[in-house]
Amino acid sequence: MSHTILIADDSLFIREALCKFFEQDDFSVCGEAENGKEAIDKAQELHPDLILLDLSMPVMNGLEATRVLKRMMPEVPVIMYSAYADSSTEKAARSAGVRALVSKSENISVLLGKARSILEPQELRRFQPFSTSPHRW
């Protein structure tokens, strides 16, 4: 099943790249925003399964937008994708309600993996697969 995602970043280049990567990973990009205020408006309109926010955006940054979004739709997880991923940023992001903070310097597979794992049903997250070891018992 394809999950919907709202992507907010002030860089058109980054938004377009993220849309491409998420769509290739079986997500449906339901909307884009270039600042936190626009992200809030689009989230209210589109009701995404997941919201991806840049930290540093004009008009309203990702932390401020997360605080508002978590009051409006607390069940929708937020991932912060930022060039600023130090411990104080992570603490502020967690305090605001961000589920995961991913540095823009990480490989895109890290971001896609976090998004998939956040949206997995709770039962599947606890599932531990059998060992893939070639040994037979």
Image (cartoon, rainbow, N blue to C red):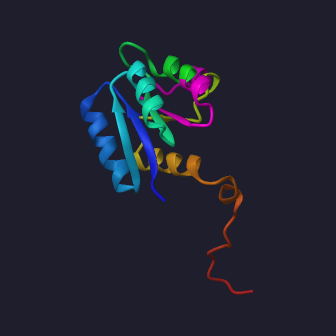
In which quadrant of the rendered view does residue 70 lie?
top right
**Residue 110 located left or right of residue 94:** left
Q: How far from the left and from the top, in percent, is residue 92? A: 59, 20
What's the magenta region?
Answer: 69-93
Q: Tell me if I can see residue 6 in this picture.
A: yes
Task: Using the image as rendered, state which of residue 56 and residue 31 is in the foreground.
Answer: 31
Taking the view exactly as shown, the residue that stands out farthest to the left is 13
Q: How far from the left and from the top, in percent, is residue 2? A: 45, 55
Taking the view exactly as shown, the residue that stands out farthest to the top is 59
Residue at 34% over, 49% down: 21
Task: Using the image as rendered, state which of residue 124 and residue 42 is in the foreground.
Answer: 42
Q: How far from the left and from the top, in percent, is residue 22? A: 38, 49
**Residue 54 located left or right of residue 63:** left
Taking the magenta stretch, the answer to whether it contains residue 10 is no
Instruction: Examine the rendered structure and indicate whether residue 12 appears above or below residue 106.
Output: above
Instruction: Examine the rendered structure and indicate whether residue 106 appears above or below residue 1.
Output: above
**Residue 25 located left or right of residue 50:** left
Taking the view exactly as shown, the residue that stands out farthest to the bottom is 136
Instruction: Examine the rendered structure and indicate whether residue 22 appears above or below residue 83.
Output: below
